Image (cartoon, helix red, strand yellow):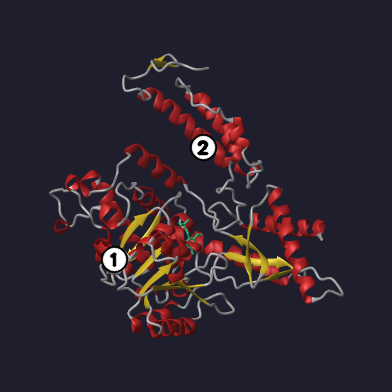
């Protein structure tokens, strides 16, 4: 049923056209009830959306509604059309990519932030956002035991955090690139950034976006455990310098995307110090584990020597997407790279009063009030509560890895330092050559991946390690228990039996 905009459900709409307070309260209660049911019943839904491409487009009208529709009709369509087309990241059997999930205080934080709808560009446009950001970043820095000199900025994603970190590293060269740019300059050699072969593609995208070009990114080989080979880095930097290139930045990864391996940050920091290179640490996933005291030496060793470090609370601190943190040892370099204040944004408050204008620290002008949801999460769970969950996820991953290691039908393909297991089925067959075996196992494991995911009971993902098709099981969802991990193992074994 369509309505005109003057009245809904017998209640006159206020002249502004938005819902009346009464209506807002009623629909708000209904929505919370609906969400509560969603979480209670989430396991009855397939974790990976079992829909064909474009199925949703075909079900929705091609043209926009001319007159407003009742909220009930809109929510009914969320239920009937949107839900089936969702892959449920909050499903406790979501084990793909990095299994990330939201949490109740985080959802409430998002609701409040949407309601306040501030644009945190200047301190005065959102003093609470500017100051709460400073406070939560200080709390998180203390939880990670990083030096006090590290000041942070909140962005949307690690891709954007790393882009800003490399932009700061470039600014730190004092080559007037901010003013002159890179194109058409004959006074500059090729600028070099280094990252391991296992680094995330966001680093490639950062050098593309910054106009450095992909040829400026030199990929350093990794060791048998997928960690950057620091000696190879030292050789590469020396070779590039001899060739007249200008090395300026190294990206170390703490928790690589495929295997969660941890680059030797201390050894890399030595090389950076020797050659005066900016050290950026991409700890998008594993950085969160730095809040767990017994994991901190593994995850954070050497990070206190970094010039910048990014980690994503939206990955493993139960924060609704999106929220990424970038810490910098000298945040003024980032300010130098991006501060640009047109007349219409000048304000009487200044940095000498301890005021920070968010727009001075990045590409964006308006910024969301992201710190609110994170503050609520930190307060609701506390440091100990968050650490306990990460600790448990690592235990569950080790447990799954022990089943793989003990089984004649499966094998581990990488160490399990944190909460991701890389493995494959290795069913034997007599009389095969090595090449035949490799091809058969790749095909078998790819079949297993799709067969397991198409059941809707679990969702796992894959990668390629040493040119072998590799299954990945990532634990990280706040609702995942030992029972879910056990069921995943049983399902994989059942799937193997029917796919041999
Ligand atoms: N860096 C690493 C190591 C990652 O694993 C990922 C994503 O998984 C990213 C960066 C990109 O994260 P985002 O989606 O926040 O840009």
Q: Which mark is residue 439?
A: none
Number of marks in picture: 2
Taking 251 as reference, is 269 above or below it? below
Does 188 sit above or below residue 16? below
Q: Nearer the viewer, residue 6 or 140?
A: 6
Residue drawn at the location 40% of the way across and 27% of the way down: 25
Q: Secondary structure at mark 1?
A: helix
Place residue 237 in its image quadrant.
bottom left
- Determine the residue positioned at 48% across, 25% down: 71
On the image, numbered disc 1 is attached to which residue?
Answer: 177
Residue 172 image point, x, y percent = 28, 70
Q: Earlier in the sequence, mark 2 or mark 1?
A: 2
Front residue (pair 51, 293):
51
Circle 2 Cα neighbour tier, 10 Å, few/some/many (<14 / 14–19 / ≥20):
few
| Residue at the image position 49 percent from the left and 83 percent from the top | 232
What kind of element bears circle 2? helix
Which residue sits at x=58%, y=59%? 475
- According to the picture, the residue beneath numbered tag 2 turns out to be 35
Q: Residue furthest left?
A: 348
Relative image position of residue 356 (x, y in whole percent): 22, 55
């Amino acid at each position: 049923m369509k309505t005109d905009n003057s009245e809904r459900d017998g209640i006159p709409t206020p002249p502004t056209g938005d819902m009346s307070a009464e209506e807002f309260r009623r629909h708000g209660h209904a929505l919370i009830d609906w969400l509560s049911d969603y979480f209670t019943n989430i396991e009855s839904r397939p974790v990976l959306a079992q829909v064909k491409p474009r199925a949703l487009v075909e079900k929705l009208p091609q043209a926009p509604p001319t007159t407003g529709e009742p909220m009930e009709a809109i929510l009914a369509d969320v239920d009937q059309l949107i839900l089936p087309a969702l892959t449920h990241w909050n499903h406790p059997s979501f084990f793909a990519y990095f299994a990330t999930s939201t949490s109740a205080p985080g959802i409430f934080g998002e609701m409040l932030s949407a309601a306040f709808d501030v644009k945190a560009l200047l301190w005065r446009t959102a003093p609470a956002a500017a100051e709460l950001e400073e406070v939560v970043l200080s709390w998180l820095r203390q939880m990670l035991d990083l030096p006090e000199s590290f000041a942070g900025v909140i962005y949307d994603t690690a891709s954007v955090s790393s882009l800003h970190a490399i932009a700061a590293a470039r600014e730190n060269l004092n080559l007037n690139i901010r003013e002159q740019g890179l194109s058409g300059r004959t006074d500059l050699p090729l600028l070099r950034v280094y990252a391991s072969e296992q680094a995330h593609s966001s680093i490639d995208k950062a050098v593309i976006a910054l106009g450095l070009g992909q040829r400026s990114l030199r990929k350093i080989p990794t060791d048998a455990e997928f960690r950057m080979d620091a000696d190879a880095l030292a050789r590469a930097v020396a070779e590039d310098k001899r060739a007249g290139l200008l090395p300026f930045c190294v990206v170390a990864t703490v928790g690589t995307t495929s295997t969660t391996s941890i680059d030797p940050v201390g050894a890399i920091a030595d090389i950076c110090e020797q050659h005066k290179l900016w050290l950026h640490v991409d700890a998008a996933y594993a950085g969160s584990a730095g809040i767990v005291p017994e994991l901190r030496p593994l995850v954070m060793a050497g990070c206190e020597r970094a010039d910048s470090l990014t980690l994503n609370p939206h990955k493993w601190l139960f924060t609704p997407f999106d929220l990424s943190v970038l810490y910098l040892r000298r945040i003024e370099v980032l300010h130098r790279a991006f501060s640009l204040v047109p007349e219409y944004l000048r304000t009487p408050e200044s940095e000498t009063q301890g005021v920070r204008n968010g727009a001075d620290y990045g590409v964006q002008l308006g910024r969301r009030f992201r710190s609110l949801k994170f503050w609520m999460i930190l307060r609701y769970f506390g440091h100990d509560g968050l650490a306990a969950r990460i600790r448990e996820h690592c235990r569950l991953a080790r447990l799954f890895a022990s089943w793989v290691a003990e089984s004649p039908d499966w094998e581990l393909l990488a160490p399990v330092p944190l909460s991701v297991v890389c493995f494959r089925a290795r069913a034997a067959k007599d009389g095969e050559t090595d090449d035949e075996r490799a091809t058969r196992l790749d095909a078998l494991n790819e079949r297993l991946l799709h067969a397991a995911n198409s059941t809707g009971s679990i969702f796992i993902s894959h990668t390629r390690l040493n040119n072998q098709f590799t299954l990945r099981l990532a634990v990280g969802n706040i609702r995942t228990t030992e029972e879910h991990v056990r069921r995943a193992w049983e399902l994989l074994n059942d799937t193997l039996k029917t796919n041999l």
